Image: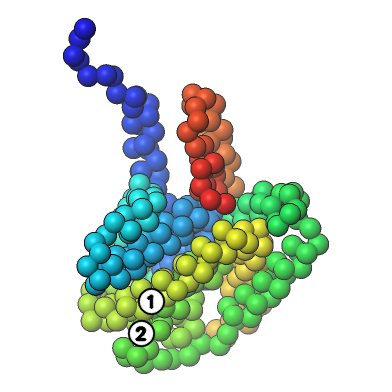
Amino acid sequence: MSDSPAPSTETAPTRASTAGAGALNVVRGALIGTAETVPGVSGGTVALMTGVYEPILTSAGHFITGVRISVVDGIRGRGFSRATPEWARVRWGILIPLGIGMVVALLLMAGVMEGLVEDHPVTMRALFFGLVLASLAVPFRLAAQSAAGHRPAGRWRLTDWAIAVVGAVLAAIIVTLPGAALEPSPAVLIPAGAVAVSALVLPGLSGSFLLLTMGLYEPTLEAVNDRDLGYLAFFAIGLAIGLVSIVKLLQWLLEHHRRTTLVVLTGVMAGSLVALWPWQDEDRHLEAPSGDLTAPIIAFLAGFLVVAALLIVERRMLAAARTAEPQTNAPTAHSDGHTDGDAA
């Protein structure tokens, strides 16, 4: 009998598929990072739109839990055995490529997007309005596919629409708050970072927009462009604080009240469209369309159609992948980031 090793179960198509998924996640991360440089556009919205919102949220929750357990057990001399299972549940194959794409995009696009938004505000807002409007289909569909208590999944009910309207109204109020001009001191930067990262996690709320409201948008972009490590260090402390608090809350909500949470997120995203209405004055008061409408209309249609095309392509790719996969007991991936083996 031959002692040659058993053939690998990882075929060339499987390896190619894994590499392709990694490259796609780098692109998704770049889109999220780019979105965070633009006031009014939520990185959480882009994450939800591209199907990685829940993997990011649940992985971040498990990572935070693992760190907390390891710190407590390390102090008590118990080792890291209790933290290991939490870290094993982190989707590193998704998070690492996403993180690479986000960091690269933030460093490369901060100056570019700042210039585009300043030079072509109406056209850029129209582009993002189209992107976000089309992406409403993602949480809307996921909410319809989720059960609520003893009620099975299905079409939106009157209660769902009422909850979404409340979320939309609250989001619209938040994104139309008047701006301020805070001094970028450590006492301001830490809470500002916490607020900004909370908006990153919440689809529909833009971290950049909230920074703009606090008068810290331009100073933060300048700090990124100038590599101001002192400024960024205090801001990063706030990011860490906000991330720990909001991620665990949202993870719990998605696990225990998934449909209602997705309904609220849909409403918040819809309400945030107020901030992206192309025609506004300097005080953010909405105005009727005026001037040359060609560029804004083209930008709006381009944004809307790009998202619609991405959603169609993703659905077809997932359907083709399921058809090509052998029928096994392995968990099947879904477009909402869950697998059959994941907790709802």
Q: Please, which residue is most extreme toward the top here?
A: 1
Q: From the viewer's perspective, is the residue at label 2 or at label 1 nearer?
A: 1
> Which residue sits at x=20%, y=9%?
2
> In the image shown, does 311 or 309 lie closer to the viewer?
311
> Which residue sits at x=34%, y=66%?
69
Q: Name which quarter of the figure residue 282 lies in.
A: bottom right
Q: Secondary structure at mark 2?
A: helix
Q: Residue under label 2, please give it.
A: 189
| Contact (Cβ within 8 Å) of mark 2 with mark 1 | no
Left or right: where 336 falls relative to 157:
left
Q: Position of residue 168 (x, y in %)?
A: 67, 71
Q: Position of residue 320 (x, y in %)?
A: 53, 29
Q: Residue 241: which numbered mark, if any?
A: 1
Q: Position of residue 184 (x, y in %)?
A: 34, 88
Quarter that holds the N terminus: top left
Disc 1 marks a residue whose amino acid type is Ile
Q: Name which quarter of the figure residue 181 lies in.
A: bottom left
> Which residue sits at x=62%, y=58%?
258
Q: Which of pointers 2 and 1 lies earlier in the amino acid sequence?
A: 2
Report how far apart the C-alphas of labels 2 and 1 lie in the structure: 12 Å
- Does the image show residue 291? no
Left or right: where 244 falls relative to 127:
left
Q: Is residue 289 above or below residue 263?
A: below
Q: Position of residue 105 (x, y in %)?
A: 34, 59
Left or right: where 135 falls relative to 222:
right
- Does the image show residue 245? yes
Left or right: where 231 falls relative to 112:
left
Disc 2 marks a residue whose amino acid type is Leu
Q: Secondary structure at mark 1?
A: helix
Q: Name which quarter of the figure residue 98 lies in.
A: bottom left
